[in-house]
Image: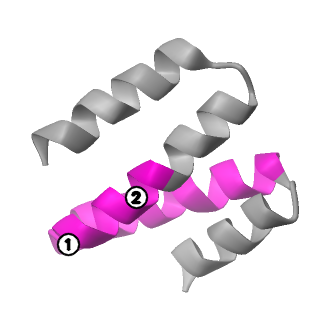
Amino acid sequence: MVLAAGWIAHDQRDIERAATLGQQALALFREQGDTSGQVETLLLLIGVAKYLGQLERAQVLHEELVQL
């Protein structure tokens, strides 16, 4: 649910909310050991980082994604 809300916020260009919800979702998926949820959330957070011009952060998140 949190991840879906993050994507909705992203689509509505509420990037700060998308980032917050994405971080919350990522923490939950890590706790649960849900790899596919982590992948989907990292894709959201990469998009947020790119939108904000945070290319180094996007790269770090991408590297984390690849390791999953």
Q: CA distance from mark 1 to mark 2?
A: 9 Å
Quick check: 56 left or right of 34? right
Position of 67 relative to 18 (above/below) = above
Q: Earlier in the sequence, mark 1 or mark 2?
A: 2
Q: Residue at x 65, y 41 (%)?
A: 48
Magenta stretch containing residue 13, yes or no? no
- What's under tag 1, amino acid-wise? Asp
Q: Position of residue 56 (x, y in %)?
A: 49, 13
Position of 66 relative to 23 (above/below) = above
| Residue designated by label 2 | 26
Quick check: 27 left or right of 13? left
Tell whether label 2 touches label 1 (CB within 8 Å): no
Residue farthest along the bottom direction in this orientation: 1
Q: Give the SS element for disc 1.
A: loop
Question: Dominant secondary structure of the magenta stretch?
Answer: helix
Position of 68 relative to 64 (above/below) = below
Q: Residues within 10 Å of mark 1 (few under 14, many from 20)?
A: few
Residue farthest along the top direction in this orientation: 56
- What's under tag 2, amino acid-wise? Leu
Instruction: Report the span colored magenta.
Output: 15-43
